Amino acid sequence: LGFPFTSRKNQEELQLSDWFNPRERPDVITTTSWLAPIVWEGTFSRKALEKHYRKQNLTTGLAVFVSGRLADQYLEMFLQSANKYFLNGYRVIFYIMVDTFVKLPQIKWGPLRQFKVFIVTEDSWQDNVDLVRMKSLAKHIIWDIQDEVDFLFSMTVTQIFQNNVGLEVLGELVAQLHAWWYFKDRASFPYERRPKSAACIPFGQGDFYYDGAFVGGTPLELLNLVEEYLNGIIHDLRFRLNSTYEKHLNKYFFLRKPTKLLSPEYNWDADFYPPPQVQYVKVAQQSKRRH
């Protein structure tokens, strides 16, 4: 994309041991092989996180992309639930990226909440929604978002917050474990396997299968992720390949390990009753693709 990026400010460093206690959840994987925390209910200290972040003049962005009938069906529920449960007590800017046909719901925003609407006028909404939303996200990070927020999350409009999602999710590069594939064997993960694709992860490799519905980090890290995805799309077009955004995302996280992972509690598939490991559903996915 070739635009300069400036960090909004330097955060005082928070040590993992200050807020994270993996021993509290021996029933699940709580730390990756590269020593990144996997956040489950019970593993983190809200008190320690509050103590650290209250000192900061913190602002977090939450971007959501919506088009056509999905807006009528899901946007109000998404915004109402995010307004209630996402980073309560901290400043949040909601970036709502829509096409020109969307009627925005009337939301009574809580304190420290504001929203901005960006109109996406791409002709290819229906052809490749993920490509359009990632291009739009990159453009708005560069021109509008980078100097406004410390952290930025991108979500899909079919999600609904059911419980508090707080400071425990903040990090430099935050990945969401896929609720469906977390409980499956790695050999069955639906990675891209075609060797000529930029998204390819060969058999026998890979760490987890990540969900494209919830991703976050600093604006710079998200911009880097989107640029790699767009480069991967261009690469694949040369070979007449068309891999999905989620598979490119998994390749990116395979090469550039996330600094924090969110458990399936943060994007549980509402079609399924949670297993014992998922004690506390924070976000439910209302219309989940299996692959």
Image: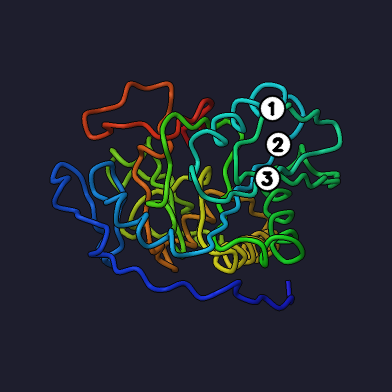
Please tell me which residue lies in front, 218 or 108: 108
Q: Is residue 213 left or right of residue 102?
A: left
The residue shown at (85%, 31%) is 101
Q: Is residue 287 left or right of residue 129?
A: left
Which residue is label 3 attached to?
Answer: 114
Contact, mark 1 vs mark 2 (Cβ under 8 Å): yes
The amino acid type of the residue labelled 3 equals Gln
**Number of the front mark, 3 or 2:** 3
Please tell me which residue lies in front, 122 or 215: 215
**Number of the front mark, 1 or 3:** 3
Image height check: is 263 above or below 80? below
The amino acid type of the residue labelled 1 equals Leu
Which residue is label 1 attached to?
Answer: 70
Local crowd size for mark 3, using a 10 Å CA cut-off: few (<14), some (14–19), many (≥20): some
Residue 109 position, x and y percent, is 65, 35
Dot 2: what SS?
strand
Q: CA distance from mark 1 to mark 2?
A: 6 Å
The residue shown at (36%, 39%) is 264
Which residue is label 2 attached to?
Answer: 66
Label located before the other in sequence (3 or 2): 2
Dot 1: what SS?
helix
Contact, mark 1 vs mark 3 (Cβ under 8 Å): no
Local crowd size for mark 2, using a 10 Å CA cut-off: few (<14), some (14–19), many (≥20): many
The residue shown at (20%, 55%) is 21
Dot 3: what SS?
strand
